[in-house]
Image (cartoon, rainbow, N blue to C red):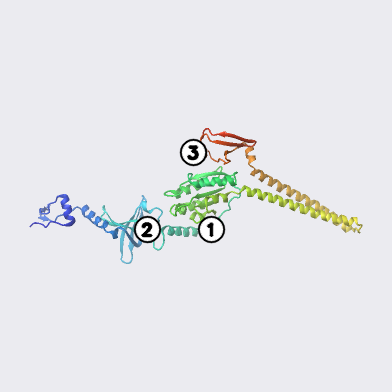
Amino acid sequence: MPRRPPSGFNARRAQQRQIDWDEPVQSSRDHGPIPQSHPVGDIARHIRSKLKSDPQLNDVWIEGEVRSFNRSGAGHYYFDLADAESDAALSCAFFRNQNRGIRVEQGDQVLVHGSADVYLPRGSLQIIVDAVRPIGEGVLQAEFERLFRNLQAEGLFNPDRKRPIPSYPKRIGVVTSPSGAVWHDIQQVVARRWPLVSLLLAPCLTQGAGAADSIAAAIEELNLLTTDEPDVIIVARGGGSPEDLWAYNEESVARAIFASEIPVISAVGHETDVTISDHVADRRAPTPSAAAEIAVPDRAEEAARLAALRQQAHYAIEGRVSGQQQWLALVRDRFDTGAPHPPTLRVELNRRRLDLDRALSTSLADIRTRWAAAGLRLNALNPRRTLERGFAIVSRVDGQVITSAARLGADEAIEIQFADGVVGARTASRERSGEAKQHE
């Protein structure tokens, strides 16, 4: 009896493979004709094409509980999304290029977004996930709050453990990108406010894959220095989106700051951006430039403060001496007028004279000590002292100070200031220092 030709999918496949549907297929055991068969792959691909052509299954949000969670060595997430009410579950695949910065854990109640697909090697239905959101929360905000609670419970934000920033640091470590504007801004602020300090760059990534580990490693590297170690560390990055700044919310960075034996100033993004690093650090600055201002004093303010101290000392001495002079004048008047001078008055006079001598000696010694200290600090602020030790200040002809060889071009007019005068010159060549080459 002739067989009915197939329709639809089977008909198309038969035409492609030139199958004669009317010709019986013999059994390998000679048990007579058997129904027409199709390869497993054809059926699996047909099911897959049906799923892909369904718009509702191509763009779908699904709510459920994460079960059987597994993270592969390549960074892919595999888990079942289960519905407790119906005992149903769907297999989900959340690939590495989609899950960066997103944490999924066993038992989470989540919304997943993705599309239905068939995994051909096993013929299993799965959801290819491209987004995961905790129910009722944004993903990044939920992760921020989760880590914040955990670290707060461990005491990483305890105000009692925060250390003061040194008032007069000699060396500052800076953890940031060597190519961004942040490094340049910090150099400019420090050179203007307190040129006596030196800066040490610990270069790192500031966003993207591997940034958190890079930042943590740079902090640890500064702490391992045995010579020329910094007195304070600035961890800095410019503004950006929450995703751009996310490395500073990673646990590895928070623990590196907490473990630092050197005080840390966190300066990430703009004033409105607050990261986990800000909470752990000894001091938070709203911007990288503000961090540089916190780290070093202002030489103009210091000079004014010293001048005010000197004036106060002058007034104090003048007032003390004037008071003693008035008392002596009063005693002298009493003697000159011929008033009776009982023995007790002479004893009191001698005692007062001795007290005056001791007070004047003590005051003068204190004044000499304070003036000497003020003189040393004023002398340290005088750039001429540095020039007399053999250093020089290089500037363009418009007066702009040059702090890096990279800022000079070939055959550029410059002025070199020595302790005893200024020399005009032009650049002939430029060579980077060994330390600068290592940081490139």
Q: Is residue 247 left or right of residue 393?
A: left
Mark 1 or mark 3, which is nearer the start of the sequence?
1
Secondary structure beneath label 2? strand
Q: Amino acid at mark 2?
A: Val
Residue drawn at the location 8% of the way across and 56% of the way down? 2
Q: Position of residue 177 (x, y in %)?
A: 48, 46
Q: Amino acid at mark 1?
A: Asn
Name the mark on residue 437: 3
Q: Is residue 153 above or below residue 166?
A: below
The quadrant of the rendering that contains the N terminus is bottom left
Q: Count up the numbered dots.
A: 3
Residue placed farthest to the front in the image? 398
Q: Nearer the viewer, residue 428 or 139?
A: 428
Element at badge 1?
Answer: loop
Check disc 2 and report the residue beneath it: 132
Q: Secondary structure at mark 3?
A: helix
- Whether residue 414 is visible, yes or no, is yes
Q: How many C-alpha atoms fall within 10 Å of the one at disc 3: few (<14), some, or many (≥20)?
A: few
Residue 230 visible in image:
no
How many neighbours does mark 1 have within 10 angstroms: few (below 14), some (14-19), or many (20 or more)? some
